[in-house]
Amino acid sequence: MHLPGTSPVHRTPAEVKIVCAVVAVFAVVATPREMLWPFACYAAGLLALWRFAAIPPRWIAPRLLIEAPFVVLAVLLPFSAGAPRTTLLGISLSTAGLWAAWGIIVKGTLGLGVSLTVAATTDVRELPAALGRLRVPGLIVTIVVLMLRYLDVIADEAARMRIARLSRGDDPRTIRRIAATARGIGSLFLRSYERGERVHLAMLSRGYTGAFTDATATPATRRQWASGLTVATVAVAICFTARVLP
């Protein structure tokens, strides 16, 4: 997910970007969905941030597809919700369902865009120290870091198992092979669990004490906090203005 670069956003300490992203997402969620102009401001600011950080749209676009299930749910809401109803293109749709669908799509897309921005500009190796400086419990930091580091390993293991099945003449796409697919998932879980045990023993033998440390990382300065939280401050200001306006 990391997109190497030299922009000021890339150089901003990871803990500043994490706090900024959380505050911005909360501001987006708290914005009344019936007001359209705040979301236009959020989208314009996000596009400007991508340009400033040199994140190309072709990198962002395919990763936005992860929200496709939520979009499908949102599309069904105008048909399933109750009265009052309105007619759009000759189709009777629920007004409340339309607003709910709009809120899910726009807030989900903006929140995902903020998350992708942090992922693109933050190296995974910066996360342990950053989360530690934010006083996140050590167990949660360990789970998050190991999940990020070994997600590709598990994906590669699943790909090798799939190739092995295909080489033996099995077709995992057919319904009648669903039992074999379930056994393969169970085998992948056991392999991942055993690998985790071996990794944990290796960490203990190298002096792991339950917390990730990075002696080379330095905490963010006040100036970095002030400049890094500018985006979050603007988002909070837009949300506040949208809520107090009639």
Image (spheres, helix red, strand yellow):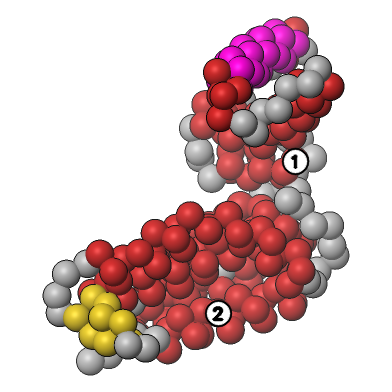
- Residue at disc 1, secondary structure: helix
Q: Residue furthest bottom?
A: 246
Task: Check residue 196 for magenta coloring.
Answer: yes
- Crowding around mark 2 (Cα neighbors within 10 Å: few <14, some 14 to 19, many 20+) is some
- Crowding around mark 1 (Cα neighbors within 10 Å: few <14, some 14 to 19, many 20+) is few
Disc 2 marks a residue whose amino acid type is: Ala
Query: Measuring 51% from the left and 79% from the top, which residue is drawn there?
Result: 42
- Residue at disc 2, secondary structure: helix
Work out whether residue 240 or residue 166 is closer to the camera in this orientation and state it.
166
Work out whether residue 62 or residue 17 is closer to the camera in this orientation and state it.
62
Looking at the image, is mark 1 or mark 2 earlier in the sequence? 2
Disc 1 marks a residue whose amino acid type is: Arg
Q: Are marks 1 and 2 in contact (CB under 8 Å)?
A: no
Residue 112 placement: quadrant: bottom right
Query: Measuring 52% from the left and 67% from the top, which residue is drawn there?
Result: 109
Viewer can see residue 123: yes
Q: Quadrant of the C terminus?
A: bottom left
Residue 235 appears left or right of 201? left
Magenta span main SS = helix
Query: Measuring 66% from the left and 43% from the top, which residue is drawn there?
Result: 127
Magenta part of the chain: 180-202
Question: Residue 33 placed where, x, y %?
Answer: 33, 77
> Is 175 rendered above or below residue 68?
above
Q: Residue furthest left?
A: 83
Determine which residue is flagged by label 1. Answer: 125
Determine which residue is flagged by label 2. Answer: 43
Q: How far is mark 1 from mark 2, CA to CA?
A: 29 Å
Question: Residue 156 placed where, x, y %?
Answer: 78, 30
Viewer can see residue 32: no
